[in-house]
Image: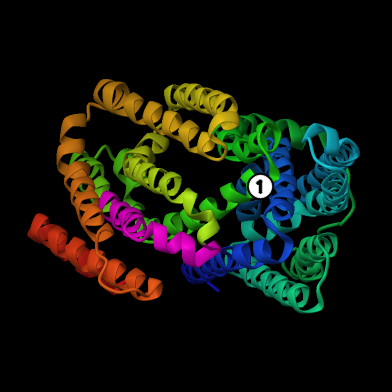
Amino acid sequence: MGSAKKIARGAVWTTMANIVNGIYGFVSVPLLIAYFGKSNYGLIGLALSVNVYLNLMDLGLNSTNIRFFSNWLAKGNQDNVNKLFGTSMSFYGIIGLLNAIIMFVIGLFAQSIFHLNDEQGTILMHLFFILAISAFISWYTSCFDQLIQANEYVGWTNQVKLLAKLLQCVVLILTLTLKFNIEVFYALTTFSMFIVIPFCVHKIRKLCPYIQFKPHFDKAVFKEILPYSLNIFSFGIFQFSFYNLRPVFLGLQGTPADVTDFRVMNGIVNIVMMLGGSFMGVFLPSVTKAVAQKNTAAINHVTYDGTKYISILLCFCSFGVISVAPELINMYVGPSFSYLSLWLIIWLLLLTLSHNQAISALILAGSDIRAITYSSICASVLGLLVCWFTIPHYNVGGTVLGYIVYQIFQVLFYYLYYWPQKMQINSWKVFRYSYAPYLIAGALIAWGCHYINVVSSQWAEFFIKGVSFAILYALVVLLLLNKNDKAFFMKLIKK
């Protein structure tokens, strides 16, 4: 199979995997809240949040391994591929053991750390013990997936991951029908992901028969990959920290019920982000080529038109959900969660500030990313500080307030300094031409749809408001677009 077909196959299966994951997350949350209770379900989110943050111990090795595996496979350097595979097994084995020990220790003191009662403390302790076992297995086998992806079989890896996700769906159904307790559900769900391991071993033996599944450490290979790995790590650590420490802060400064609130809103936001970003890859591949060739016209097209197209999609998805937010919350998890509507609306509104992704791609295509690394550090630290000090007063709202600070700091940095000073981009033109018209249109239409109350049925009202917003927003956008924009969107729809 040629590279082009592998890429196309990978794109299809990656999209399918994202859709299935999104649907599973969206559907499972209200079912599990109703079954386990709000506070107990929050314990799962708390345990996962703590463990997710420990993924930082990867030190950027995931992307690094794929890069070096791909390079050496292309050159036919089987010896280095085998050395890196064995070195990675050794490194990940040590990291997995450390992760397991940390989870075990946190589990022993979980009740006092998170201020829980005896029953919840025991449940959380068991969840951390389950995580300790699964973390070691997951870390130790991490390089399996990396080597397969380096062989351009991204589609295949997502196929077997879909099998694991389907197994998780079976576990969910069995839990609700056979009345499993929370520990059994979590253990079965976690360990079901390891069904992919035998398939990965078989695939590697087929693709790279010279690979030895024995951990060994090669100092020269590790020394070669480490600088690149640390660059990747330093760029992403603070953004990763901001996004993944918020639910941990909720557990420390709030209650497990607050963590449940966060997961409810995050589930809806993730669906919006998935929908808003699903077409962006269609018009961003030219970025790196344009920068490399110093093609000013192409760069301007990405800067202003690319940002405009992203703004249209983001505003459509964000304000579309905002227009039906109260109804969506009530239908999703029940009227007892209706107090989340305001915080959800603010969070969705902030998502539109991600309209700078096209220009960010231009930045990453360059060689100097130090300035945006520094801005990410400042934004993340400030956002987390706001979260920590506001959670005791506003509960889950504190995480949204922290997100406000994080997003506004980043946007002001780009608009007021980086774009005009470092990239010679007209920030006012970006705002006036590429973002503001669609922000204003979306906000006004969503506000108008919010006051539509023509039927008593909540489902019917949800449908009427949603359809009304979609039609009105599409009509306004058509009036705002020029001929070239309309031609582009016709091609986009066809693709």
Using the image as rendered, state which of residue 258 and residue 59 is in the foreground.
258
Please say if 299 is above or below 154.
above
Q: Is any part of residue 12 visible from this angle?
A: yes
Magenta segment boundaries in residue numbering: 310-334
Q: Amino acid at mark 1?
A: Ala
Image coordinates for residue 265, horizontal then vertical, percent: 51, 52
Q: Main secondary structure of the magenta part?
A: helix
Relative to 176, is 11 on the left or the right?
A: left
Is residue 283 toward the left or the right of residue 73 in the image?
A: left
Instruction: Tell whether position 56 is magenta.
Output: no
Q: Position of residue 474 (x, y in %)?
A: 19, 64
The image quadrant of residue 181 is: bottom right
Q: Residue at x 25, y 59 (%)?
A: 451
**Residue 330 belongs to magenta span:** yes
On-image quarter of the C terminus = bottom left
Q: Position of residue 18 (x, y in %)?
A: 53, 64
Nearer-the-camera pick, 248 or 65 = 248
Task: Please tell me whether residue 151 is drawn above or below residue 398 in the rendered image.
Answer: below
The reply, left or right, for residue 342 in relation to residue 309 is: right
Residue at 48% over, 49% down: 339
**234 lies above or below 40:** above
Q: Which residue is mark 1?
A: 257
In this orientation, which residue lies closer to the viewer: 427 or 288? 427
Asked which quadrant contains residue 193, the reply is bottom right
- Rate crowding at label 1 as few (under 14), some (14 to 19) or many (20 or more) other CA atoms within 10 Å: many
Vertical position of residue 328 compared to residue 304: above or below: below
Q: Secondary structure at mark 1?
A: helix
Q: Quadrant of the N terminus?
A: bottom right
